[in-house]
Amino acid sequence: MTVYTFEGRIPKISDGSYVSPDATIIGDVTLEGEVWVGPGAVIRGDYGTIKIGTGTAVEDNVVIHARPGEVTTIGKHVTLGHSCVIHTATIHDFAVIGMHSTVTDYAVVGRWAVIAEHALVKTKQVIETEKIAGGVPAKIIKDVTDEYKKLWEDYKYNYTSFCKRYKDGLKEKL
């Protein structure tokens, strides 16, 4: 993993987290317990602050950043799908951000909310708790069901288990 301090801003990565050797973490970034960070992810707290809660999956090529003096907050057990972008936003616990989606400045994604693939959550837009939104710009499509939550809880705990499994079992083939 490539982890950098920057102008006195020092990343804090819990021992239970896993950060891919191909990911980059810079500056004022906090990863709580069992955060899984995949290859190519960039988490940049160079002039803003990034906080990521326990059990969150930051999948391959995700970009997370914050404006100067601002905070991007990602809750617990959030899934950030491949190649999504999160910028100066708040993502609440158990949310799912689909692949290639963008959640931008001062937007809020509620607990158990889902942002569909390739969607755009605009500046200051709020996606309420347990709603599914998609499109450009994102619009509410339907509600999250209990069956959906059960399915995604299983997926989310797969990534939590990946932290230890990757630390113990990922070996470079020579």
Image (spheres, rainbow, N blue to C red):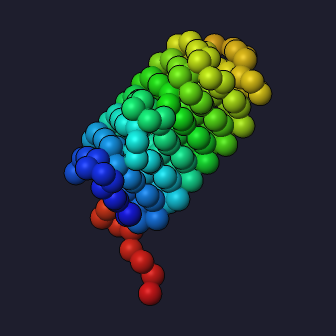
Name the residue located 47 percent from the left edge and 45 percent from the top edge: 58
Name the quarter where the C terminus is drawn: bottom left
Dividing the picture into quadrants, the one containing residue 75 is: top left
Q: Position of residue 18 (x, y in %)?
A: 34, 54
Q: Residue furthest right?
A: 136
Q: Position of residue 100 (x, y in %)?
A: 67, 43
Frontmost residue, 86 versus 154? 86
Q: Position of residue 173 (x, y in %)?
A: 45, 81
Name the residue located 38 percent from the left edge and 53 percent from the top edge: 26
Name the residue located 46 percent from the left edge and 65 percent from the top edge: 22
Name the quarter where the N terminus is drawn: bottom left
Please state the total of marks drawn on the protein image.
0
Dividing the picture into quadrants, the one containing residue 105 is: top right
Dividing the picture into quadrants, the one containing residue 5 is: bottom left
Looking at the image, residue 22 sits to the left or right of residue 16; the answer is right
Against 39, residue 170 (above or below) is below
Q: Residue furthest bottom?
A: 174
Frontmost residue, 103 versus 5? 5
Q: Position of residue 65 (x, y in %)?
A: 49, 41
Name the residue located 45 percent from the left edge and 43 percent from the top edge: 57
Looking at the image, residue 129 sits to the left or right of residue 76; the answer is right
- Residue 75 makes an appearance in the image: yes
Looking at the image, residue 71 sits to the left or right of residue 102; the answer is left
- Residue 152 makes an appearance in the image: no
Frontmost residue, 170 versus 30? 30
